[in-house]
Amino acid sequence: MAQRIPRILVILFGYLVFSVFILFPLLWIFLMSIKDFKDIIAYPPVFTFTPTFDNYRAIIFGEGSTGLTTGISDYMKFLRNSVIISVGSVTISALIGTPAAYALSRSNIRGRDTISFTFLSFRFAPELAVILPLYAIYKKIGLYNTYHGLILANQLITLPLTIWILMSFFKEVPMEIEEAARVDGASVWQTFFHVALPIIRPGIASALIISFIYSWNNLIFGMVLGGAATQPVTVGILQTMNFDQIKWGWMAAAAMISAVPGMIIALYFQRHLVRGLTMGALK
């Protein structure tokens, strides 16, 4: 036991350093959100100050000049738009990506690896490379400044992630289990729904959470393909930047509020997420 103590201390110290590295930016943004403007721009930085929630009131309730035009009607609208776009994107990716991942992991069709890599290449491609053609197409066919247009565009982000994450989980399901179900008379769809899906449920949770976070944080699609009625919260946060100054307190408060949905979803699915990330690591 005495020989293990130094090793345990080193591991705990490593965890502490890693936690500080991960949490410090979030803590810094939170401190900015409860500071007055003079405390935010003070140099050197001040760590003893009187907390204020004026920034949150300005963002949520529109008290004072928020830089978001009409306060609550704008920022909360951006927040609602992000919820609609992200939930819609993840839902469509789950409905399409789950059967696609199952087919690619189980079938022996010619060119399966090429098809899989093609899906992955959609994620490799920079968004700036496709945004201008998408903008021109959307303007012509009427998808510009629409929820379904932004949801379809986000499939370039969420669908490849969903397919590739779930493919690895389907490959971990022993073929013998599915073959036993087929021998008992189950069809392909019955095997898929009643055998494979329940086993990889943690993987589905992991894929949906990761896809949701990527969709929620996306900026380019909402900025170029969305208008005033459909722009997400990532674009709304930018409107705290005026022509003469940046409202750092309001921006920090808006960023903290915008991070809440992702935190709630991650905490709610935490059990499935942890199991999903470790599933298949050991046999």
Image (cartoon, rainbow, N blue to C red):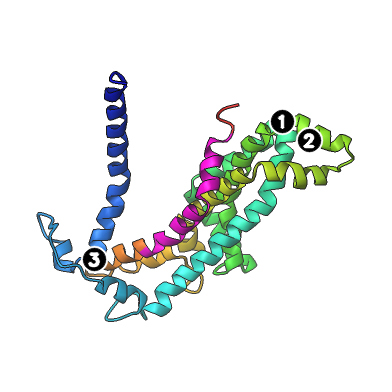
Amino acid type indicated by mark 2 = Glu
Task: Write down the residue under mark 1.
Answer: 174
**In the figure, is residue 82 to the left or right of 29?**
right
- State the image coordinates of residue 244 (x, y, percent, origin top left): 22, 70
* Cα gap from disc 3 to disc 1, whole angstroms: 53 Å
Q: Residue at x 47, y 53 (%)?
A: 267
Is any part of residue 170 visible from this angle? yes
How would you rate the neighbour count of disc 2 (Cα within 10 Å): few for under 14, some for 14-19, many for 20 or more? Answer: some
Q: Quadrant of residue 92?
A: bottom right
198 vs 2, left or right, is: right
Coordinates of residue 185 in the picture (x, y in percent): 90, 40
Magenta part of the chain: 257-279
Report the residue at 65% width, 52% height from top. 94
Q: Three-letter amino acid code at disc 3?
A: Ile
Residue contact between numbered discs 3 and 1, judged by CB atoms under 8 Å: no
Give residue 34's mark. 3
Q: Is residue 107 above or below residue 248?
A: above
Amino acid type shown at disc 1 = Pro
Tell me if residue 67 can be seen: no
Is residue 263 within the magenta segment? yes
For this view, does 187 lie left or right of residue 124? right
Q: Which residue is mark 2?
A: 178
Residue 174, above or below 128: above
